[in-house]
Amino acid sequence: MIDLGQLVTGLEEEKCKMEIAKASQEWGIFQVINHGVSLDVLEKMRCEQVRLFRRPFHEKTKQGNQKFNFLAGSYQWGTPSATCLRQLSWSEAFHVPLAGISTTGDISTLSITTKQLATKISNLAQKVAAILAEQLGYKPDSFERDCSTTSCYLRLNRYPACPISPEVFGLMPHTDSDFLTILHQDQIGGLQLVKDGRWISVKPNPEALIINIRDLFQAWSNNTYKSVEHRVVANKNAERFSTAYFFCPSYETMIQSCFENSVYREFSFREFREQVQEDVKIHGYKIGLPRFII
């Protein structure tokens, strides 16, 4: 747990930045408080999600997405590529490009709340990325151009109560594919990460946001920062809601190590995503960064 309220001038600021870098190196995930995202907005977002997911299934599918001013195809459920029960994610989600919601004139409470949350978390993501770049000796504005709100996403998640838990996961074990994820989870819990070969639960905290390093940051930092494998455990008795912000570059962005002796070859984000999708289609799971080792 890191208090971002320490990011003021002086020794406290430097200590906080070092804590962020250390957590990113040793764990690949950490929680933050005093993050600048109002708890009122976070609670409003959760209430909007509950109402959204209570809609009938036919309203949430492709035709219904226009009802919420989300792009067609943003609603997802289960795992279309699953070849066995263990590959099935017991969940549903709206995967929402920020480029889509930032241009709409929709004045519904869902749209307004989504925009408010996205603006605040975007600022936080840029701040954390700047700190991580600075701690490796690079300019704090290294990600401002490539990771704008036009290329980032929000994912609104619901994990229904699962009568056959633990035979399936809410979300299968995986690493995330871009630079950072910033997550707010409710009090049900279920998020777990791998540390030293064992699964550790992330304790819910209503005032905290969870930040985890993703594949592109691991590649860019030449394995200095770790993209942590994580999963969501299904719950037999209660449904779970969470909101995730994905700090993404444009598809044309080239990912290159910030060090000379790179572990990974240079690749575009588009190439990385297409390779991941191909592997999931063929093998049923993501291979990820090992595909790009020199």
Image (cartoon, helix red, strand yellow):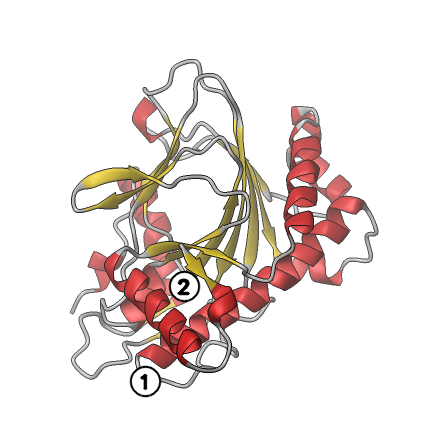
Left or right side of 280 for 99: right
Report the disc number at residue 258.
Answer: none
The location of residue 175, given as percent across then percent down, is 32, 50
Seen from the viewer's position, the closer of residues 184 and 14 is: 14
Amino acid type shown at disc 2: Phe
Left or right side of 251 for 230: left
In the image, residue 225 sits, relative to residue 101, either above or below, namely below
Amino acid type shown at disc 1: Gly
The location of residue 200, given as percent across then percent down, is 28, 39
Q: Mark 1: which secondary structure?
A: loop
Q: Residue at x 63, y 47 (%)?
A: 42
Seen from the viewer's position, the closer of residues 8 and 261 is: 8
Crowd rating for badge 1 (residues with CA inside 10 Å; few <14, some 14–19, many 20+): few
Left or right side of 99 for 188: left
Report the disc number at residue 137.
Answer: 1
Task: Determine whether label 2 and label 1 are within 8 Å by CB.
Answer: no
Seen from the viewer's position, the closer of residues 23 and 100 is: 23
The location of residue 25, given as percent across then percent down, is 26, 63
Q: Mark 2: which secondary structure?
A: loop
Q: Residue at x 38, y 56 (%)?
A: 177
Q: Earlier in the sequence, mark 2 or mark 1?
A: 1
Cα–Cα span, label 2 and label 1: 18 Å
The location of residue 194, given as percent across then percent down, is 25, 44
Residue placed farthest to the top in the image?
Answer: 163
- Write down the residue under mark 2: 179
Q: Residue at x 38, y 77 (%)?
A: 14
Q: How many marks?
A: 2
In the image, residue 257 sits, relative to residue 184, either above or below, namely below
